[in-house]
Every structure is written in structure tokens, then in C-alpha cells.
Image (spheres, grey):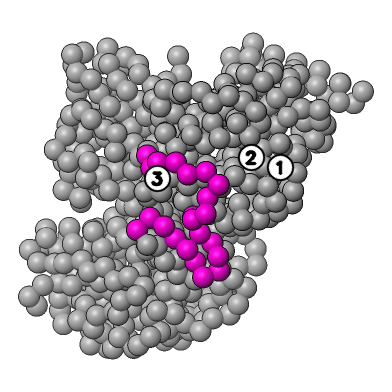
Amino acid sequence: MSQLRIIRIHNELLGTYGDQGNAEVLAFRAKHLGVDSTIIDISYDQLIPRDGDIYLLGGAENAAQLLSLEAMKRDNTLKDAISDGAVLLAVCAGFQIIGNTFWANDKKVDGLRLLDIETNAGQTERCVGDVVAHSSVFNLDLIGFENHAGRTVLGTSTEPFATVSSGYGNGDGKTDGAVQGNVIGTYMHGPILARTPALADLLIARATAQ
Amino acid sequence: MRLRISLLISRLAGFLSQKILRRSGETIQGKVLLTLYPNALATLSKNRSIVLVSGTNGKTSTTRGLAQLISQLGTTVTNKTGSNLDRGSATMLMQPSQYAVLEVDELYLPRLIAQTHPRAVLLLNLSRDQLHRMHEVQKVADRWRTAVAAAPDTTFIGDTDDPFVAYALSAAKMSIRVSFGGRTHSDGAVCPSCGIYLRWTNTNFACACGLTNGKADENRAPGPAAYRNAELANITGAALGAKPMTFDIKSFERAVEKTISGIPSSIRLVKNPASWSEALATVKGQNIILILNAREVDGIDTSWLWDVSFDALRGKKIIVCGERAHDIHYRLHVAGIENTQERSVASAFAHFAPTDHVEVLAAYTAFTQLVTP
């Protein structure tokens, strides 16, 4: 690989909860690891490039989440890039978008189906606060901050990203996020890679192993 | 009769809080009053002209300026200390006056509008802040809009360059739409009114649904937030008949000059991406202390640090401290801005000499601690 291409998708829409920092931490860790990298911002009007190594989605409010989904449905680029081995880290609203279905503005919406998950509208209290978790997939202790209404249920093709020891995670207080191959979803802000830079290193290792 | 007894007990509670706990006693009085007499805000607002000020940033200094303007017209009470929930307002209204100028928290604004029937409401701005409590900016804007629509006898004044304010104002029967131009909005990619992608042409927006910052009632030149808030205070004052004043813009910056540990310092309140960006644009010197806390009123999540560009600090002598010093230390470190992390505020100041001048940017709780005598 000549240069690690970090694709930050729809930052103007998916940038409400600070997750854009994930791109900066990836580039910073890559430099530390001796990997040349570049951050490419893709806005709502632009097509998502096929040749990315790590794709990033962040948290957003409902209307912005729907706009981002609509833009990503213009083609199959993200799906194709993932089948070629690219890594996708999706946080909060971004995590919900890449599932089978989710709820936004009182409507059930078809997602991108990159992760076998379903997110239901939260009937009770919103899940807000610090999260402490452990990811056995990555063998890492994690901390983050969650702020979401939806509750996510995992399908048979996915495994949890982490087990939660403090916080709501997917809503049951037991697990957070989901992993399916190189697709990783989580509710943890922080941004998650700033809180646990070791996860950034592991994502870089996966992306450069292609 | 019941109100009179409730007032007596509330004053007693305030007195005891001052004498025994040595607190200001401001919040407790209103809290007790609202418990004993839930309708107190409405009752105490009768026969009084009420003006409310709300927004993410600039509430306290703008309220102070506006109270100065309004006090030309008659006796005026105002909440000076930033106690801006319903209880703080109740405490202020316990004193008799012809006018009341009240700073109101964004989430409490609808309740205050419904209960106090204000003559005028000034809406400064809305952007992401304390999301653990506000959750979503759009939801706050929706609540504002509903409250505005339900108050046809109130004049709403607001800065329509902020799409969320423009959206709330568009429901008003009486409004003064002010535009300064010259800036965009960091949360302004989606139309708050119809949810489509909001198209900006330079610093103007005009959505297909009709939401726009064009066709303002009052146009002013672009400028920093402190200047804009002073202008908005004057426009609001004028709506009630007050003569405009020439303000020292510094007084609208929420900056305090003070010598701390022998070091001459200017201390500025910063609490969210918008206020950090405003403050960083005014940094002049080489000596910087950044204090980050994450208690309830600061916002318990620090993720938003990554929404702020700290480039203005590059190359300066920067000491970071506070309960979440590590978060800001790492954020700057990743941006390639070298800085030193200290355990306490005192040890941060120890990096400087009495001949230096230090610019301190402090989170709400740290700011309050530093500037309180």
C-alpha cells in the first residue's frame, strides 16, 4: 500500500458528537506506526470513493442521519469497498445507518445492510452517559460516551463489539455495537479512537493487511 | 395570602442559606417558592414588563447589558449570577419592580414564556452544547418554535443568520429579524424547518421551504459575537422604548481581568465549540492556560473538543489542567500543538512569572471558581 486512505464520510452531517476526531487519531497513529496516510472528506454532494482503506461514519441528529443515508444509497461503493477488504468504523447514528433497519423521526427506515442489526426506537429513557466496556474481538478495554435513543438488536451474522460493564450500550446494558468482518459499529463517542488509540492501531493493521 | 406566606418562608430559606451555608441564597429562595407556590412565576409577573434572553452563548453578558438599557425606563430586576433556571427567575421576581430582564436556560425558555407572558424575548443563537442534557439541537429549536407560536402578544427578536433562530422566529406573530451576515453555522447543514440539505451561498441560506436569513427587518455589519450581542441588546431595548447605549464590547466577552497567584491574567469562559472558536479568535499573547472540567454544567462529555480547531494556539506556551486535562492534552497533541499537562490550576500558574500576562480559557465550573472573590 502506498498511502493509507482514510475516508471521513459526510462530516458536515455526521459531525454532531465529535466523532470526526476518529480520522485525526487514525492519521496520527498511522504516522507513529510509519504508515503514510491521508484524510479525505466526502460531503453530501460528493460520491464516495471506491479506493478507501478505512471509512468512517459518525453520530448525528435524525434529519442529518436520513440525509446521509439517502446520499450513500446513490451507489454501492461502500459495500464494494468492504468486500474488497476495507475497514468501516461507524458510530451511533452511523452504526444505525449501516444496519438492516432503524427508526428516525417516527418512521422505520431501510438501512444499508452492511451489518446484520436492527435498531428500534427507544420507548423509555434516552441512553446517555459514560461507557466502560471490553472488546473480546479486539482484546481491548474501552471507554466512551453514549448519547442515543435507539435500541439495537444483533442478528445471527454479527457478534457484539464489546461487553459493557457500565452504561447502556445497545440498550440492554450488556453489549455495545456489532462486528461483522471488517465492519465495526458502536455507540461510543469520545471519540472512541481518542479514548483508546490502541483500537486505531488495530484498525490500521487490518486495513494494511489487505 | 398563600403567596405571601410562601414568599416569607422562601426569604427565610435564602437568609439561612446565606448565614449558615454562606451561599448566595439566590437559587434556594426560588426553589422553595416554586415548591410552595407552583404558580409563582405567573403571579409575580403580572403588572410587570418581562424581557427574556436565551441562547447557547452570551446569555449572561447580554442580559446584563439589556438590564442596563431597560433600567432607563423604570425599576428593573435581573438575574446577575447566571442562575437561569425557573428557580433563579422566581427569586428575581420576588422583588417588586416595573421591569424584569431575565436570562433563561434554553430548555426552560418555553416554560418561562408560557408563565411570565413576556413583552419581548431575545433569541441569541443555538448550537451544540451540553448534549448530555440537550440531546439534539433540533429538538431545542422545535421546543422554541412551539413556544414562540403560542405567544402572539410577545415580540421576538433574534439573529436570523442562525438557522435555528430563524426557524423559531418564523412562527412569531411579532418579530424583529436581525441579520449581520458574514458567517455560517457549524451545525447548519440541515434545514431545521424541513430537514433537507441546507444550501449556503457564502454566508446566506435560502431553503426551498422558505427559511432564509434574507429579508431581515434590521441589517447590521458583520462582527464578533460580543459586538452582535450588544447590537441585539440595543435593538431589544429599543423595542421597549429604551435609548440605545454605546457599550464597551469587552463587557460582552465574559472576560475577567484578575491577578491569580501573582500572575496578571485575563480569564475567559469557554464551554462549547462555538464559544471556544470565538475565544480562540481573540487570543493575542504567547502565554496560555486551558482548564477543562466536565461536571454537569460544563457538559459531562468532552467529545466536542474535536470539533474545535486549536490552530490559533500553535507555537504558544500552553499549559493544560483541570479534571479532564488529559482529554484536551491529547486532542492538542494529535493536532501537533505541543502543550504541558499539569495536575492543578495552581501548578499551571507556577509556569509563569509575575512579569508575564496569561490568557486563561476556562470551562464553566473552573471559570466560576477563578473569578469568584
**Badge 2 element:** strand
Task: In the rendered structure, find residue B274 and report the number of the disc placed on it.
Answer: 3
Instruction: State which mark lies toward you, 3 or 2.
Output: 2
Callout 3 amino acid: Ala
Task: In the rendered structure, find residue B121 and report the number of the disc placed on it.
Answer: 2
- In this picture, which residue range is highlighted in magenta? B202-223
Apparent side of residue B75 relative to residue A13 in the rendered image (left or right): right
Callout 1 amino acid: Thr
The one nearer the camera, A105 or B205, is B205
Q: Earlier in the sequence, mark 1 or mark 2?
A: 2
Q: Are marks 3 and 2 on the same chain?
A: yes
Q: Quadrant of residue B8?
A: top right
The one nearer the camera, B25 or B211, is B211
**How far apart are the two marked residues, 1 and 3, measured between alpha carbons?**
28 Å
Residue on which disc 1 sits: B154
Measured from the top left, where is residue A23 in percent x and y?
26, 63
Please give the chain letter of the residue carrying mark 3. B
Callout 2 amino acid: Val
Q: Quadrant of residue B91?
A: top right
Q: Earlier in the sequence, mark 3 or mark 2?
A: 2
**How far apart are the two marked residues, 3 and 2, measured between alpha carbons?**
22 Å
The quadrant of the image that shows the N terminus of chain B is: top right
Q: Quadrant of residue A150?
A: bottom right
Please indicate, yes or no, whether residue B262 appears anywhere in the rendered image: yes
